[in-house]
Image (cartoon, rainbow, N blue to C red):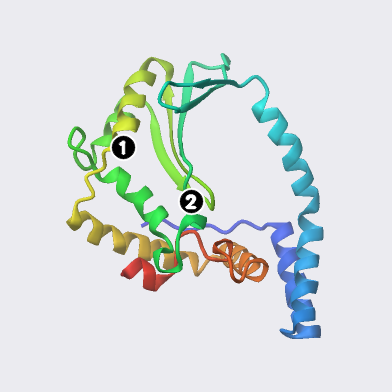
Amino acid sequence: MGKICYLYNPVLHYILCVKKKISNILGHSEMGRKSWLLGVFMVLLPQILMAGDLDGRLTHGVEKVVLENGFKVLIRENKRAPVVALQLWVMTGSTHEKDHQAGITHFIEHMVFKGTERHPKGEVAKKIEGIGGHINAYTSHENTVYHVEIPSLGAMDALDILLDAVFNPLMDPREIDLEKEVVLEEYRRSLDRPETQLAWDFLNLCFPEHPYGRPIIGLEPAISY
């Protein structure tokens, strides 16, 4: 069994202290809510400004190619190591879901790794790892990203496997039932992580009537449906 290790985060610690003090003074009133949001914003402002500068560095030297089918390909060459990083971005995230669908995008991300006709269950990751690579994915509010890091000699094989996994998942009903339990366990573990709870609470306070206010992973009733 793996273990979750919590590292001390001074920014997180300060935000939690601010929230506790404001709650003690103002309770759960509208004024308290606004003061809490303002306090968090002031703490995060320097990091937001730094992120803007980072964005410029990441896009420098990127070449964009649009294929005949409209598929956009972004290429950034870096010869410091014989390694290729492949990312396939699906422009759908949790904000595109209705309330009763909450978490479905993240669930589909899980199911992509459960096999295709060409690559049965377990073979997608096994083949990537067999040529020295690593494959994973993540879901955000706006996108779902499937990514592979691989030695350059295996790049074309890895791209073929990645495309097959994303575009041709089997969606076996038996695997769907099994994966529901996996996602539910992931959700329940999140309830024990203070930093995750902080992020969920903050977004819910900011966007109480918007999909941004929901956890990307969804809520237990929707996951169990």
Numbered circle sitting on residue 167: 1
- Residue 52 in percent (x, y) is at 74, 39
Question: Looking at the image, can residue 153 be seen?
Answer: yes
Q: Disc 2 versus disc 1: distance between alpha carbons?
A: 17 Å
* Residue at 29% in and 32% down: 164
Q: Looking at the image, is 191 positioned above or below residue 65?
A: below
Image position of 162 (left or right of 141): left
Q: Counting other residues with Cα less than 10 Å from the Cα at mark 2, is it few (<14), some (14-19), or many (20 or more)?
A: many
**Residue type, mark 1 in image:** Phe
**Residue type, mark 2 in image:** Gly
- The residue tagged 2 is 93
Given residues 212 and 123, the one toward you in this image is: 212
Check if mark 2's residue and mark 1's residue have beta carbons within 8 Å: no
Q: Which of marks 2 and 1 is nearer the N terminus?
A: 2
- Residue 15 in percent (x, y) is at 74, 65
Quadrant where the C terminus is found in the figure: bottom left
* Residue at 61% in and 71% down: 208
Image position of 161 (left or right of 61): left
- Residue 155 in percent (x, y) is at 39, 20
